[in-house]
Every structure is written in C-alpha cells, then in structure tokens.
Amino acid sequence: MNKNLKLLTLAAVALALVCSVGCDKLRARDQLNKGVESYKNSHFEQAIDHFQQAVQLDSSLTNARMYLATAYVSLYIPGVDSPDNIRNAQQAIDQYQKVLDDKPSREQKVNSAKGIAYLYLNMKKFDDAKKHYRMASDVDPNDAEPYYSVGVIDWTASYQPRMEERAKLGLKPEQNLNPKNKDEKKVCDELKAKNMAVIQEGIDSLNKALQLRADYDDAMAYMNLMYREKADVECDDLSARAEDLKTADHWVDETLRVKKEKADKAAQNPGGITVDQPK
C-alpha cells in the first residue's frame, strides 16, 4: 500500500512538473507575441520587458533572444557615447552572443553575427566588427553585405590617420604628400607601412562584394575612395599614383552609371513593387 502510494505521489509530482514546464512554454510564447506587438508599435522598452520574460520562462526560445537583441539595437543611437547608450549596445551584443552559443539556425547565426558587427562598427571597435562580419561570410559566403562592410571599415581605418597626419602638416585637400619634402616623405612612408595592407584588404573585400552583386553601387563608391587612399600613400611612385587615380575615376563613372540605370528603371515602373537591397 505504501509502495503504491509512493508511486502515485511520484507520478503526480512528475505530472505537475510536466504541466509546469508546458505552462511556462505557453506563457513564454504569449510574452513573445506581446513583445512583437509592442515592437511593431515602436514601444521598444515594453517590448524588451516582454522578451525578457519570454526568455526567463523558456531559455530555449531563440526567437525571443533575437527579438530582445533587436529591441536593444532599436534603442541604440550610433555615435553617442553616453553610458545608457553603450549599455543598450552591450545588452544587444550579449543577447546575440547567447544566440550564437546556443546552436542557432543558419539564418539566426548570420543575423546575430551581423548584428554584433554592426554595433561594434558604430562603437569604432573595428577589429571586433570585422571578426563578426567574417563570421557571417563564413556561414553565408554568397552575401555581399559583409564583404562591403569590411571594405568600409578598412577605408575608415586608413582615412582617419591619414587625414590627421595631413592636418599636422598643414596640407590643403588638393595637395599631395611631396616626397622631396623631408617631413612629408617621412609621413608618407609611415602611412604606407601602416595602411597599405589595410587598403589592399579593403579593395579585395569590395571586389568580392561586387563579384556577388554586380550592381552594388555603394561598393563601387567605396572602391573609388579606397583607390584614392592607395594613391595618396604612393607618394614616391608617380606612375603608381596616376594609375590608382585612373582606377578611382573609373569607379566614379561606374557608380554614376549604375545609379542612373537604377533611377531610369524606377522611373519606368513607378507603380511597381521594388525590394531594397540591404546595405
């Protein structure tokens, strides 16, 4: 009798646990749906509260973590270094990272890696940004966007220090570094040693983006900028500089051509439905 009673008690406890887990999953789904509704209405803080509750009720609900990260990103303002803003970015990164650590689907892994990369890019943590864009490319090598983004990062990383050094020398925008001037020659050599590998990586990345998307006009625009970076540090090789500037001008022409083609196409189909390419 006692044995039967114990068995019945254990069965009841097991059933209660099963019901509890099942109920938590249902409540988690309800919180997820409420969070999505709040997010659609731009009530991001309410959405965050719902998504947090969903994750607490069911830690395996990966979609809730994805939405939670996205809601934090919606509160993040690029370029603002206030503690609250940085906290929003870090909380988004933490949630994306938890998704990456939890055997996500292919799409979830790509979106999480790109989400982290975007935040690090705007926080000027360029190495971390490139690391995660490359992670996205490893999962989806046919996506042009991560390659383009690495090119943008490389241009930023080479342009900023070059402009700082030019400002110290008092050079005007139209003036090139002069290899016959001792101080300018020294700066040019230092910039070339520091930036040339970054510039080449940027060119290679943008080329890859254009191989995947032939009409990627934003990538073309940055190809122009990257070759101008390359030209400016070729101060001791006038022939190489001239060739770089010729290539840069080619990409200006290509950018304008593609933009015109897209504008003409849009004008011919004003009532049609177009799908914007991600940038």
Image: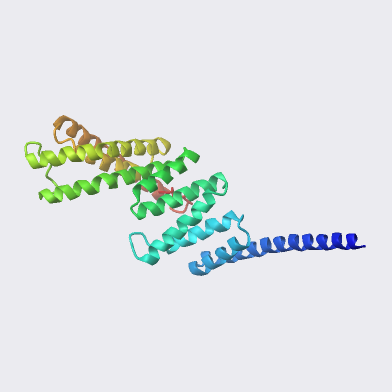
- Residue most toward the left? 181
Question: Residue at the location (35% across, 39% down)?
Answer: 206
Question: Residue at the location (18% across, 39% down)?
Answer: 190
- Where residue 156 appears, as percent x and y from the top left, is 28, 47
Residue nearer the viewer, 268 or 58: 58
- Where residue 244 appears, as percent x and y from the top left, is 22, 35
Question: Residue at the location (57% across, 58% down)?
Answer: 64
Which quadrant does the N terminus fall into? Answer: bottom right
- Where residue 70 appears, as percent x and y from the top left, is 49, 58
Residue nearer the viewer, 93 or 77: 93
Q: Is residue 59 shown left or right of residue 119? A: right
Q: Is residue 54 above or below residue 261?
A: below
- Residue most toward the front? 2
Q: Is residue 42 visible?
A: no
Q: Is residue 57 shown left or right of residue 89? A: right
Say how the picture is coloured.
rainbow
